[in-house]
Amino acid sequence: MITLKKITTKKEMKEFVIFPFSLYKDNKYWVPPIIKDEVDNFDSEKNPVFENAEAQFFVAIRNKKIVGRIVAIINWFEVEKQQIKKMRFGWFDTIDDIEVTKALINRVKKIGVKNNLEYIEGPVGFNNLDKTGVLTEGFDHLGTMITWYNHPYYKDHLEQLGFVKEKEYLENKFKFKNVDSAYFNRISNIIKTRFKLTALDFTKTKEIMPYVDEMFEVFSAAYSKLSTFVPISESQIAFFKKKYISFINPEYIKFVVNEQNKLVAFAIVMPSFSEALQKAKGKLFPFGLFHLLKARKYSKDVTFYLIGVHPDYQNKGVHAIIFDQYTKTFGPLGINNCIRTPELEDNEAINKLWEKFAPITHKRRRTYKKRIL
């Protein structure tokens, strides 16, 4: 018999967070989160995303043991301001039992019905900065800290329950050696001269902070046309600054400004922390922080987390300036693999951006949708 339990205490929340540690115990491709960070992420008093969203957390229990989990999410900005009547679900994990998945999804559906929502979509997070999608291809590739990993049967469970594909995402990677440094240096110089642009490089985090708010303005302008876009609030930006910017190598963040010193493009790249997180096993202490700091300094693989160009400067070759700066930064560091975050398959602009690097699609993922009847 399967029973569902709503998470109401900090102890239960920790149990919710650590369930995947047993589910993927012997899987060498799963990348665990830092347990404390994940618990804090779900704390409405610490994460400002809850100003515009609400979430209910559930675990499925059989024989006194957790066998599945799910988060039921309503982003009220999306529902009320954008008039998108979506019931979200995320952080979905389950054993290979369709009845467990059915019980979890039915609870999400019940919340959607109660709130007069029209359809369920997932797995997704609260907004565009969260993880998204069920992995459908590439199960034998190492995950990243900014994506969910899952067993192959997740897709089958959702499809058996009547869910259909909503969005398809590609994950690509390429060798840094594929980047033609001479070409991008030449194009970069032309573009900077033609449009009076300047590239900004950094060596200290404090130099970056004054530009972060403006970076999110460019992010919103660049991504607002995507069907998945939900705005990021000022308090969420402040949360992002505190949680992420200070930990990212400052030299891995690139900005481009115009002659008025107005930000027109940006890119955030991170060292790959995947192997370090596996070694940390969900804990910063006593040794987890050491593994993360070591990866921050010595990792030869990098993950392109965010990249954006203001619409006024799109299709003008501005991205060449960013890539030129990265060739100058990554070359001396001996960077090997460049890994991209999930990108919408139908985002032609982003696909065109990377085509010169001979990217390889090594993973696919998708979100699934079902109408609430």
Image: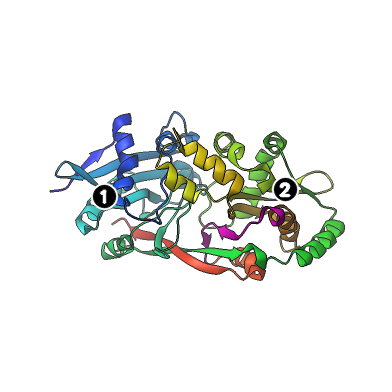
Left or right: where 70 falls relative to 265: left
Q: Which mark is residue 172?
A: none
Q: Secondary structure at mark 2?
A: strand
317, 341: nearer the viewer:
341
Q: Quadrant of residue 61?
A: top left
Q: Which mark is residue 104?
A: 1
| Residue annotated with mark 2 | 255
Which range of residues does the magenta coloring cover? 331-345
Q: Position of residue 109 (x, y in %)?
A: 29, 50
Q: Residue at x 31, y 50 (%)?
A: 25
**Quadrant of the image for the C terminus?**
bottom left
Left or right: where 212 falls relative to 201: left
User: Is residue 115 shown above or below 183?
Assistant: above
Q: Quadrant of residue 17?
A: top left
Residue 9 in view (yes/no): no
Q: Residue at x 66, y 68 (%)?
A: 178
Count of residue discs = 2
Q: Position of residue 79 (x, y in %)?
A: 44, 46
Left or right: where 253 falls relative to 261: left
Residue 50 is inside the magenta segment: no
Residue 340 is inside the magenta segment: yes
Q: Are marks 1 and 2 in contact (CB under 8 Å)?
A: no
Q: Residue at x 33, y 41 (%)?
A: 18
Q: Amino acid at mark 1?
A: Leu
Q: Residues within 10 Å of mark 1 (few under 14, many from 20)?
A: many
174, 170: nearer the viewer:
174
Q: Secondary structure at mark 1?
A: helix
